[in-house]
Image (tube, rainbow, N blue to C red):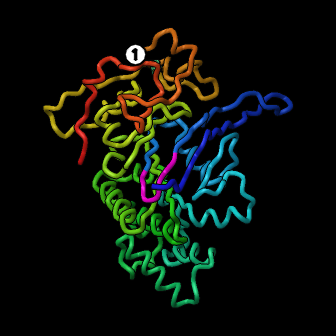
Amino acid sequence: MTALLEVNGLKKHFPIHGGFLGQETAKVYAVDGVSFAIARGETLSLVGESGCGKSTVGRAILRLFSITEGEVYLDGERIDNLSAGRLRSMRQRMQVVFQDPFSSLNPRMRVRDILAEPLVNFGLVKGRRDLNEKVADLMDKVHLPRDAVGRFPHEFSGGQRQRIGIARALAPGADLIICDEAVSALDVSVKAQIINLLVELQDTLGLSLLFISHDLATVEHLTHRVAVMYLGKIVELADRRALFAHPHHPYTRALLSAVPVPDPTAKRQRIILKGDVPSPINPPSGCKFHTRCPFVFDRCKVEEPELRPVGGDTAHTAACHLDHVPGEEDAVVPVAA
Ligand code: SF4
C-alpha cells in the first residue's frame, strides 16, 4: 500500500511568555519528533494519556497552527509549508471529526445547511437540485433519515449528532479523516455503532483514518495499526494484533493492563504506574518514561532510546533499551478477530 499521509520528525513546541516584557520564558514540548505514515484505506490509531500530544499531532497535520520542525506529506505533496491558497485545496482532502459534536455543529443551522456549507464552499455542486441530492446522499451514508435535514443539532441524540459531524467531514470528498476523540463522549453502545459506521465508510469509500484516542480498548476493533504516545513521543508502533498480543514497551503494557478482558480465565495482571505524567515544559532526561518505569536502570536516565524493531518483527518498533522486558510473556492479551 502506498502512503497517503507521511509525517516525518514532527515537532510542535509552544512558547510560554512571561516576565515584565512578555519575553519567552519556557516552552511546552507538546510534540517532540513524531514520525509515521498512513496508507490509503488504512486506520492508524494514536493512543496515549491526556496531554501526551496526540491531539496536537492531529491539529498540526491539519495546519491549524504552524509546526516547529518536521515535514508532513499528503499523497506525496509537502503540506506543512503550503501557502494559504494551496492550503484550501489540501483541506478538501483532509477533514476532522471532533469529540463533542454539539459544540462543533452550529446550533443555529439546520442539518441541510451544515452539510451544504462544505459542498458549496469547495464548489462541488451544480445548482439547487444537485445540492439536495448530495445532501441526501450524505444522510444515507451515515444512516440518518433524509427527512431529518430540516432539523437543528439539538433535536438529535449525541450519536446522531456525531453522524452529522461525520457526514460533514465526508462532504468535500476527503481521502483522510482525522477522528480526534470522536467517540470518547458517547455511551458504550452508541460508541460501538459509530465505530461500526467508520469501519463501513472506510470499506466503501477507501478512506484513511487517523484515529486519536486515550483508550486502547476503543481502537481495538477498528484499527489496523497503533502508535502509543508518551510525553510528545511515539514509544511503540505496531500492527494491531502484534501490539495487543505482544506489547513490548512498559508503558504500552500498563495501558493494556487496564483494558477489560472478556474472558475471566485469561491471565493478566493490572499494572499501576506510580506518579503522574511529568510536565511537558520540563520533560525528564533520557527515556521520558523513566520516572514511572518499573524497570528503570542507570542508562535510561541519560540516554534516550530510539524506536527500534522488537521481537524479530521489523514492523513492530518500540523505544526501550531493554530487549526483553521482564514479565513480557504475562502481558499477552486475547486479541479480537
Ligand atoms: Fe523503562 Fe528504561 Fe525502557 Fe524507558 S528505556 S521504558 S525507563 S526500561
Q: Position of residue 225 (x, y in %)?
A: 40, 45
Relative to 182, does residue 329 appear above or below in the rendering? Answer: above
Visible in this render: residue 218? yes
For residue 306, side relative to residue 256 (left or right): right
- The kind of residue tagged 1 is Pro
Ligand 1 lies under 8 Å from the Cβ of mark 1: yes
Visible in this render: residue 99? no
Q: To which quarter of the image does residue 141 belong?
A: bottom left
Relative to 233, does residue 202 appear above or below in the rendering? Answer: below
Q: Position of residue 61 (x, y in %)?
A: 60, 51
- Which residue is nearer to you in this view: 313 or 138? 313
**Mark 1 highlights which residue?**
294
**Is residue 157 one of those drawn in magenta?**
no
Q: Quadrant of the N terminus?
A: bottom left
Q: Residue at x 52, y 87 (%)?
A: 130
Which stretch did the figure color magenta? 37-43
Q: Residue at x 36, y 40 (%)?
A: 216
Q: Residue at x 52, y 43 (%)?
A: 36
Q: Position of residue 257 (x, y in %)?
A: 30, 30
